Every structure is written in C-alpha cells, then in structure tokens.
Image (spheres, grey):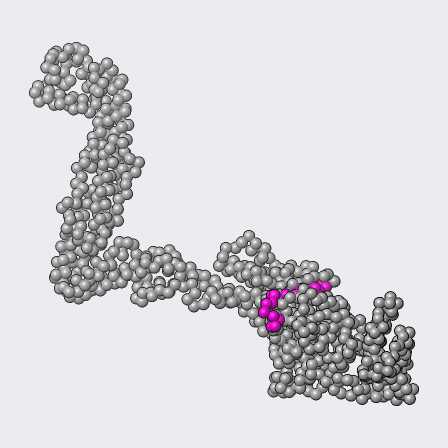
C-alpha cells in the first residue's frame, strides 16, 4: 500500500475536518493560511459552533484518491538577475547557469559569492541560520533588496521575484543550499527532515492544520475567555443552586423563569422593613398589626368584589347575548305589530313608552271600576280621553289586546326586561376608592406600585361599564389588571394566616425566618432579573465551551506522529540511514562511528547526528573542524540520495577547513552528483576549483565555469570565463590561442601600433611562461606537489619514473624563450626590444600544446 493510500485509509474514520484537511492537501499540494482557516470553519460547523454551509455535505464525503499522483518535478536554477539592494552586488548583472551538470563559480573573497548564495538561502531550502539580506553599508541610500530567480520546473521555465519576507514557493523550496552554517547545523542541531515519500506531506499538512485549529481552540478556551464574571448567591435555595451549577445542560426557559417580576423586585425593600420591624416587637403587637392590615385589605376587596364579578371578561359576551336576544325578539314583535296594527294613528304603538301607558290604563280600570273588562267595550268610558268608546275604538282596543297577548310580544317584553336588568345592575355598581385611601396606602407599603395598579384597575372597570351600557356594544373591552386583585386576596389571606398562627415568641421567630427565606428568594430572583442578559450569555458560552472542548479533544497530533513515524521509518528513515552510512564510507570517514538519530514530533520527522556507543550527543565536541564538515556533507548527500528527487543543489565554499584528501573526495562526490542533478558550486579555493575541473573532465561530465569580480565600490560582476589562476594547462593553452587569433586580426587590419603589439606580445609570453609552469606542476610532475595545497600526493610519484633529460631541455628552452619576450626586467636601451612575429607565437603555442597532449595521452598524466 502506498503512503497516500495508508493515510487516506487511516483518516477515513477521523473527524470531517481532518478529512477535509487531507482533501485540501491532496488537491492543493500545500495548505495556505486561508485554507487552514477554512479547515477551522469546517471544524466549527461539525461541532455546531457555526451554521453548516451548503458545502459541508460534500466536505464530509469519503476521500477519493482515484488517479492521484504526486509529481516529482525536477527543478533547475537557470539565472539570478535583477539584483537590487543586496549588499554590494552591482546592479544589471545576469548570472546564468546551464540547467544540467556541474556549474562552478569562482571568486575571491569579497567578490560577491556569499551575497548571491544569501539570496538563494532566503528563497530556497537550507538548514541552519539564514541571515537577512542587507544593503550596501557604504551607501546612505539603498533600494529595497530584490532579485529575480529563473528556474526550469519539469522543463517549464518560471520566474520568481524574491524580496525580504518572501514566504517561499514549493518550486524554489525544491532547490537546496549548503554552506558553513548548514554544516554546523547538521552536526550540532536537530532539525525537521525535508525529504518525504510521495504523499507524506499530507500528514505534515494535517499536523499543521490540527495545530492551527488547536491554537485557536486553546485561545478560545482560556479561563474567563468569553465568560462574564459574576458574584453568585451562595445560599441553598433553588435559584442559587441553579446559578452555581450553570453549565451547557442548563435550560434557558428555567433560567428565565427564575427572573423576578417587577412586582417581586419592588417587594424586597418593604419586606426588609417588615422583617426589621417585627424583630423589634412582641407577638401581640405584631398580631395586632397583622389583623389591622387584614381588615383594611378586606374592606378594599369588598368594594372590588362586585365590580370584578360583573365586569370580568365574561361581561361583554353576557350583555351581548341579552342585547342580541332582545333585538331579535323585538324584530319579531315588530313584524307582528305591522301585520296586526296597520292603520293605527300612531306609528310607535307597541313601543316601550306606549306599553307603559297601556299598563297604567289597565291598572286604573282594575282599581277604579272593578268588574269592568279591559280593554273597554263600545259604549264604555275611556280612562284616558274620558269619552265614550265608539265601535271603531273598541275594535282597535281589541286588536291591541290581541297583539299584546301574542307569544312574540311577550317574549320581546321578557328579553327587554332581562337586558334592562343587566344594564341596571351595571348602572348601580359602586366603583370608587375615595373611602379606601388607607387600604391603598397599606398595600403600597407592602407592595410598592400596587396602589397605582389598583387605581388603574378601577379606571379600566369604569371604562368597561361605560362601554357595556352603550347602545352599540364594542368589539372588545379594555384590559384589566386582575393580577393585582389576586395579589390583594393572597396578601389578605396571608395576613390572616400569620395572625392566626402567631401566639408565642417561637411563632414570631418562625414567622420572621419564613419572611427571611422569602426575602432571600426574592433577592436571588432579582439577581437573575438584573443579570439575565449576562447569565444567558454565560449559558450560551458554556454550551460553546462544551463544543470547543469536544473539538479540542480532536486536536491531538500523537496519532499523526505515530503514522508519520511508521511511514517515515519504512520510506524515509531506513533509506536515509543506509544512504548516510554509504556516504560516510564513500568519503573514507572511519575514525569513529556517527549515526543518524530520528524521531517524530507533531507529525514532523526530526533529524540529528550522534556518536554511536558514546554518551556524548554532540558530534562537534569530538570531531575536528574538517571532520565535522565531512560528516555534514555526508548528511547532506544522504538526504539527497534518500529523497529521490533530482532538483538542483547549491554549495557555497563546501570545503572550507577540509584538508587535501577531503577536498579530492568531495570534488569527486560533487562531480558524481552532477550526473543526476544540477550542481552549482561557489568557491574561492583554487585547488578545489582545479579538482572539480579535473574530475569533471576525467569523468566526461558537462560543466560550466563562471567567475565573479569586484571593483572598488561594487562586487558580483559576472565573467563568463574563470580567472587565469584557476585555469588548467589545457584551458590556458586554449585562451592563449584565442588571444593570438585576436592579435592576428588586429595585425591584418593594421589597427595595432608597434608599441601596442610589443606590449601584447610581452603579456602573451608572460602567460605562456605561467602555462609552462602549470604544465610542469600538473602534468610533468603529475600534481604530486600542488601550489595552495597543504599535502603532497605521494601516490602520484609512481608515474614520475619516465622523466628524462629531454623533458628538462624542452622545458628549459621554452621557459628561456618566454623570459626573452615577457616584460620582467629593465633592459638596456641599446640592447633593443625583441619583437616576435605572430607566426613564431603560433609555433610556441604548438610546442606546449603538443607536449601537453603527449604527457596526458602517452604518459598517462591525469
């Protein structure tokens, strides 16, 4: 199973936000801060800390790695240009590198090598201290540091503009840089391994994402963070116990229910006064006071009893029913009247005023003329008009009597009587508080604000009565505060019970204690009322903290470290240890045994060098400076070998402090590595430079040579050829030939004065003499003794047995001739200045070229 498959299988039963982190790492390659923030938001959604977006279901889906591949791009550095504000580097220079093979950049101290490598260390990947890039200290004004780095990534060109604070790019981070600081770090420090098998970056990114979430959650869970401090009540009451136990399981409605009403809050101060007063009196005095207050409240309740009953919320429906019944039955009676009494001289016959007249007439006849029928017959005297009733009048009276005797007429009359009785009851209600000011004052003393509420109740009852007595009944009646009436009744009954049970001092003590408990409860409920918003906010915060702690429990990286360690061991550590041992062996290091010590921390594999079978963990205390550099190089090469990638590596003076044998071995190793990747070497060591060139030529490796130069005020001037001192015999011969071609051209064009030609010829023979000296050192004497080198290559002596007198004579003759023409002595004027021809110069080059070829091919000089 591949590392990617192992990771995806392992993370399948982990939280959604872990899977999303791996999904992003799969698709994005490396997680940005923005993507880590998105992972944090997914974690919030998963734990109910924020609303789930439409994308959450997709994020919760299982991971699909079908077709997933991690590309291992080969990255080569092709140029450094556009340099500004970097130490004393000259602007306008273009340092170009072939994308393959070995690239050697030679430069003396102060020529700008470390400035160029400083840019690369800041932009690419390196171990050890990475010092910030600064401007030219000799200039008062410097532009902001900047450089353009051009690379080939998977054969595709790309340019990156580096500036201080540059966050880096995965492409540039593929390029590694080794210098003195890196060497010290390998030997003395523990650092994160930068080589990962395909897909292992998923665990690194996951660990980083988990740590990012953990940092945020830890901050949000800090003690007191988000919880408002409150000094809670400390009694054993229900309210106090609820508040002290407030947590994520507490109920909002229950908390709100514990909040005091305005009436309850207003009760606190009077109750405190009442307790204080009762504590100062005897049971008899207190009982008398209670009875007196009971009587006052009873009288107040008595005046309110009937209005409250008659004008309660049922009053409107009750009166509406009576009124509707009367209207309905009156209409039936009217219909009968129309049918029965048409032609009457009065239109209001049958109305209530008329009925009064009719009833009065009936009662008069019954009283004044006993035995006379009513209504009167024809010929009787009318009690109203005092005239004899005619036949027509008698008929009308009969019709009226029949009408009034009808069921509809009687029902209308009954409905009217009922409705009128109801209205009369309302009209007769006594709604006034003029005689009850004392009761109101008593109530106000115990329950502040209750007096105004009673008055408001009386006003609303009076308004209800008015509306109910209107011909046009209202749709609704105004609200009435019946709660205050209930409070009156409750208070009256309480006073009665207190007085009834109060006979002894013990009874008084029990009464006071009861009121103290009531006061305590009211005060705690008032506390809830005053701090309800804060308490609700704290309750919400407790629920958030509960969810955060559940999220926090998912932020441990130990499981990531264990999986990373397993994969690292099989895919990284074992190959790394094997490669390190092979590199040390190849470098010939065997004075003591150095081993690689690795461990996993937070999903990152750590790398450290230790002495095997020793209690000394610091290699630098045992190894010499040269040995330390050799061990560090072995570590660096081992990482490259174990990594499996083929991106460029840059070395800045890799052989500082190395003796002869270490330089030669290092040169061979670098040249060998250049067959697998681009290897760029900055050096000021001419001997090491020579070893690199000779090793590359011996192995047939492609290599390019550049050099850096400086002026009085600037450094980093790029030269496309190495300096003369760094050239081998063969390259010096090629340079001399190129100079001769240029000299012949000027000679043919007759643009060169004789004096200038003599100076050019003198320089030519001076360099030719130096070339003969280099030939003797490199070829004839087989580099047994090399200038600038500390040791003598005695193993090369075996090839020096073939030197003969002919060799001495050839070299002596050539050196003498060169001494004739080069400027080095103040010759007498009379002797004249020798003037060689270009043909002669051609012949002299031919002599050294032929001899160099003979030594290299026929006599096997390396």
Name the one closer to the observer, 486 or 398.
486
Magenta-drawn stretch contains 153: yes
Return the x and y of residue 198 as percentages of the image width and height: 68, 67
Residue span colored magenta? 136-154
Asked whether, in this view, residue 6 is left or right of residue 850, the answer is left
The answer to whether residue 5 shows anywhere in this view is: no
Count the labels in the image: 0
- Left or right: where does residue 45 sit relative to residue 1? left
- 482 to 850, vertically: above or below: above
Direction from residue 633 to residue 280 in the image, left or right: left
Q: Quadrant of the C terminus?
A: bottom right
Q: Quadrant of residue 826?
A: bottom right
Residue placed most toward the observer, 328 or 407 = 328
Image quadrant assignment for residue 96:
bottom right
The reply to whether residue 20 is in sight is yes
User: Which residue occupies 56% across, 55% down?
Assistant: 56
Position of 243 compared to 853: left or right? left
Whether 839 is drawn above or below 52: the answer is below
Can you give x and y, in whole percent of width and height, for residue 51 in the image?
50, 55
Whether residue 483 is situated above or below residue 71 in the rendered picture:
above
Q: Quadrant of residue 560?
A: bottom right
Quick one: quadrant of the N terminus? bottom right
Q: Residue at x 43, y 65 (%)?
A: 225
Where does the image place residue 344, in percent across and percent down from the top left? 22, 15
> Whole-percent x and y of residue 242?
35, 62
Furthest residue in direction front, as rendered: 830
Front-most of residues 15 and 612:
612
> Is residue 434 a member of the stretch shown in magenta?
no
The residue positioned 23% from the left and 18% from the top of the image is: 347
């Amino acid at each position: 199973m591949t590392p990617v498959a192992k990771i995806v299988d392992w993370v399948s039963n982990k939280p959604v936000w872990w899977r999303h982190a791996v999904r992003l790492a799969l698709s994005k390659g490396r997680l940005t801060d923005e993507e880590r923030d998105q992972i944090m938001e997914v974690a919030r959604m998963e734990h109910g800390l924020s609303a789930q977006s439409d994308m959450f279901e997709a994020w919760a889906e299982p991971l699909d790695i079908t077709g997933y591949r991690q590309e291992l791009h080969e990255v080569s550095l092709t140029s450094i240009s556009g340099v500004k504000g970097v130490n004393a580097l000259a602007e306008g220079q273009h340092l170009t590198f072939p994308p393959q093979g070995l690239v050697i950049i030679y430069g003396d101290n102060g020529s700008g090598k470390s400035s160029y490598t400083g840019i690369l260390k800041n932009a690419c990947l390196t171990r050890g201290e990475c010092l910030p890039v600064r401007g030219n200290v000799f200039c008062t004004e410097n532009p902001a540091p900047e450089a353009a780095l051009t690379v080939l990534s998977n054969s595709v060109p790309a340019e990156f503009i580096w500036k201080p604070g540059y966050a880096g790019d995965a492409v540039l981070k593929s390029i590694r840089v080794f210098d003195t600081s890196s060497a010290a770090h390998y030997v003395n420090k523990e650092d994160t391994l930068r080589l990962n098998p395909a897909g292992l970056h998923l665990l690194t990114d996951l660990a980083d994402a988990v740590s990012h979430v953990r940092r945020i959650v830890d901050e949000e869970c800090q003690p007191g963070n988000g919880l408002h401090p409150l000094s809670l009540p400390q009694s054993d009451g229900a309210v106090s116990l609820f508040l002290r136990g407030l947590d994520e399981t507490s109920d909002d409605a229950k908390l709100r229910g514990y909040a005091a009403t305005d009436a309850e809050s207003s009760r606190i101060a009077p109750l405190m006064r009442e307790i204080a007063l009762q504590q100062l009196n005897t049971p008899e005095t207190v009982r008398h006071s209670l009875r007196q207050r009971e009587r006052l409240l009873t009288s107040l309740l008595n005046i309110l009893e009937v209005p409250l009953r008659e004008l309660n919320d049922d009053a409107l429906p009750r009166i509406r029913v009576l009124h509707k019944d009367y209207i309905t039955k009156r209409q039936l009676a009217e219909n009968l009247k129309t049918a029965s009494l048409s032609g009457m001289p009065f239109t209001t016959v049958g109305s209530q005023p008329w009925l009064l007249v009719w009833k009065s007439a009936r009662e008069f006849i019954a009283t004044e003329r006993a035995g006379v029928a009513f209504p009167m017959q024809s010929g009787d005297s009318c009690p109203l008009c005092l005239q004899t009733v005619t036949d027509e009048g008698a008929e009308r009276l009969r019709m009226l009597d029949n009408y009034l005797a009808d069921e509809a007429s009687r029902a209308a009359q009954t409905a009217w009587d009922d409705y009128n009785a109801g209205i009369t009851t309302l009209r007769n209600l006594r709604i006034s508080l003029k005689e009850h000011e004392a009761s109101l004052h008593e109530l106000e003393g115990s329950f502040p604000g209750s007096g105004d509420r009673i008055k408001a109740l009386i006003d609303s009852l009076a308004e209800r009565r008015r509306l109910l007595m209107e011909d046009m009944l209202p749709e609704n009646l105004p609200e009435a505060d019946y709660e205050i009436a209930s409070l009156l009744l409750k208070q009256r009954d309480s006073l009665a019970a207190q007085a009834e049970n109060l006979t002894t001092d013990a009874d008084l003590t029990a009464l006071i204690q009861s009121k103290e408990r009531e006061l305590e409860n009211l005060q705690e409920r008032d506390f809830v009322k005053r701090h309800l918003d804060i308490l609700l906010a704290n309750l919400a915060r407790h629920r958030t903290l509960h969810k955060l702690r559940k999220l926090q429990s998912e932020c441990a990286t130990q499981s990531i470290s264990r999986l990373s360690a397993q994969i690292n061991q099989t895919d990284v550590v074992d190959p790394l240890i094997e490669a390190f041992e092979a590199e040390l062996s190849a470098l010939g290091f065997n004075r003591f045994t150095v081993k690689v010590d690795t461990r996993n921390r937070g999903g990152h594999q750590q790398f450290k060098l230790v002495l095997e079978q020793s209690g000394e963990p610091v290699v630098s205390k045992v190894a010499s400076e040269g040995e330390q550099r050799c061990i560090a190089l072995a570590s660096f090469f081992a990482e490259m070998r174990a990594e499996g990638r083929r991106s460029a590596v840059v070395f800045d003076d890799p052989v500082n402090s190395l003796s002869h044998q270490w330089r030669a071995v290092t040169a061979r190793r670098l040249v060998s590595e250049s067959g697998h990747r681009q290897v760029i070497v900055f050096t000021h060591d001419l001997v090491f430079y020579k070893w690199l060139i000779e090793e590359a030529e011996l192995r047939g490796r492609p290599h390019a040579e550049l050099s850096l130069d400086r002026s009085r005020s600037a450094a980093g001037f790029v030269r496309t050829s190495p300096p003369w001192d760094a050239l081998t015999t063969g390259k010096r011969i090629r340079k001399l030939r190129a100079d001769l071609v240029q000299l012949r051209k000027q000679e043919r064009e007759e643009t060169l004065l004789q004096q200038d030609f003599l100076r050019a010829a003198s320089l030519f023979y001076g360099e030719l003499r130096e070339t003969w000296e280099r030939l003797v050192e490199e070829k004839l004497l087989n580099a047994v003794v090399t200038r600038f080198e500390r040791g003598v290559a005695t193993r090369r002596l075996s090839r020096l047995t073939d030197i003969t007198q002919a060799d001495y004579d050839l070299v002596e003759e050539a050196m003498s001739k060169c001494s004739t023409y080069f400027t080095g002595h103040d010759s007498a004027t009379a002797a004249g200045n020798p003037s060689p021809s270009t043909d002669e110069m051609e012949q002299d080059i031919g002599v050294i070229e032929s001899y160099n070829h003979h030594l290299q091919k026929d006599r096997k000089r390396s």
